[in-house]
Image: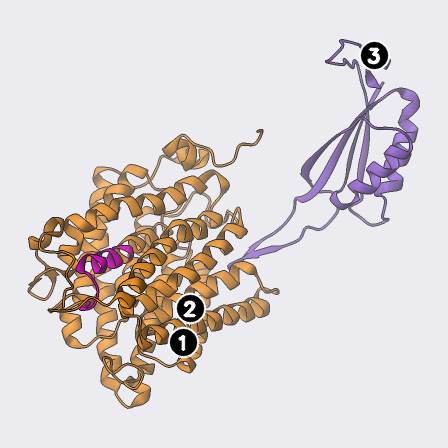
Amino acid sequence: MKLIIAIIQSDKLDEVMGQLDEKEIYLKTVSNVLGCGRQKGVTEVYRGVKEAGTLLKKVRLEIGVNDSYVQPTVDAIIKGARTGSIGDGKIFVLPLEECIRIRSGETGKVAIG
Amino acid sequence: MPKIDSGDTAWVLASTALVLLMTAPGLAMFYGGLVRRKNVLSTMMQSFFILCLISIQWVLWGYSIGFGPDVGHLFGNLSWFGLNNVGLTPNADYAPTIPHQLYVLFQMMFAVITPALITGAFAERIKFSTFVVFSLAWATLVYDPIAHWVWGKDGWLHNLGALDFAGGTVVHMSSGFSALVLALVMGRRKGYPRITPPPHNVTYTLIGAALLWFGWFGFNAGSAVQANELAVSAFINTNTATAAAAIGWVILDWIFAGKPTILGAATGAVAGLVAITPASGFVSPISSIWIGLIVAVVCYIFVVVIKQRLKYDDSLDTFGVHGVGGTIGALTTGLFAQKIINSGGADGLFFGNPHQFLVNAIGAGSTIVYSVVMTLIIALILNATMGLRVKEQDEAIGLDNTQHKESAYTLID
């Protein structure tokens, strides 16, 4: 079992979700995050005071998958999120020790869905 | 026996409500959007609670000191305490066609918003208890006397002929310069200016600015205390100057900040509203355009250049917009006033009467000196006894939590 964490551009979320749906990967958690990598920030100005934007708005996807689904998930995310420029984001694949479905108590491969 | 005019009374009733709107929620939202989310409630509470405090202070002793029987041309006595002898028949000196108590209430809303403006200077770091005492003391010792000088029967600036239609000196200069004193006495917020927190919600600030613009028609046009040509004059001047100032600030932002900003448009509009306040019943609409453009330039310089260079923490620019804007208003009134607009006024310097400019300058100068000295005394006494600032740790946690045990926004449900 693996936990896939993907940080993507906010406006790419719809496309990524679409690609994941096509591969029948439905279970996910999405959150708004701030992040920076090698992308330059946007400077904002308030009454002449410049706020140097180093942290940018990104979206974070967390998906728990069985090992056989890792590659399809990664492919789907990349297909939906890649633009070719700096700021596309990153995907982390972490080993997942256990997964438990709260409703039924099922564990392991069955629980991941 | 003065006769009540229903048109005048209806208009002043409406204006009274409009000016209340300027404080709550107008100013509350304007300032609320500018602070960090952890301080938004405390900022709004300050405006809202001042409305409550002065509503009582005014009917007890505030109106009497501001408008009551004159003592040495400096303030009114307390014979009108608790609205004693202030009934529903008109007062011929102040507003002969509306009930006296309506005039009281109309003036009350000015007495409310003035200390509320000062809250911008000490945002995010004042102790609530000290703030309450300060507001009452300031209203009584600074606002009420200055109101008497300019608007009270036999007030010395009134007798001198200073022209201040709706309160450029009384409201904006007094609060603006007092704000600067407080900002300096209390010191900068922690981390300022290296850390200058951006507004947490510019949409609130814009909504607040729009409410202020709307309510200001009551502030200025209502000050005619009649539903007549003068009210219309003040109305059109108010709108024109405000629009000119907003456009002016947007252009300056476009040039110097790179883009036109919404905050700039909102701030410019408020600066215009401030400057046209003393002038609104005395100048022409074309003069209003000039006044708007002039105040946009001068306030921009104070807010964007001078404040950043000198690094004083006038957090929400009360001095930069109201203090400076009010001064520009007082002086431009002395330049642009025309007797043909308002025969009760006078001509200004540009229309052949340099004396008016001088008189208005005296009014402005005396307001500055008195406000600064008196506020300094009040601030130093309160700082030594109650303490003005919250503890450093409380400032870091946020005033909503530490002063009010509340949260503006729940994060999870």
Residue name at image x 78 percent, y 28 percent: A28
On whether disc 3 and disc 1 are found on a single subunit, the reply is: no
Most common SS among magenta residues: helix
Residue sitting at the far bottom: B352
Q: Is residue B126 left or right of residue A66?
A: left
Q: Amino acid at mark 1?
A: Ile
Q: Does residue A68 sit above or below B198 in this rendering? A: above
The residue tagged with tag 2: helix, strand or loop? helix
| Residue A78: quadrant of the picture | top right
Whichever of callouts 2 and 1 sits on the residue coming sooner in the sequence is 2
Tell me the CA gap for discs 3 and 1. Answer: 74 Å
Seen at 20% across and 68% down, the residue is: B97
Residue B28: % across, % down: 41, 49
Query: What residue is drawn where x is 13% and y is 70%?
Result: B156
Instruction: Give the image's coloring scheme.
Output: by chain
Residues in magenta, as a range = B95-109
Image: B166 above or below A22: below
On the image, the x and y values in percent for residue B276 come to 37, 71
Chain letter corresponding to the colour orange:
B
Q: Is residue B78 left or right of residue A47?
A: left
B101 inside magenta stretch: yes
| Residue under label 3 | A108
Closer to us: B350 or B127: B350
Q: Amino acid at mark 3?
A: Gly
Q: Residue B313: tell me if it is visible.
A: no
Residue B291 is marked as 1
Q: Which residue is mark 2?
A: B272
Chain bearing mark 3:
A
Quarter of the figure with the C terminus of chain B: top right
Q: Chain of mark 2?
A: B
Q: Residues within 10 Å of mark 2 (few under 14, many from 20)?
A: many
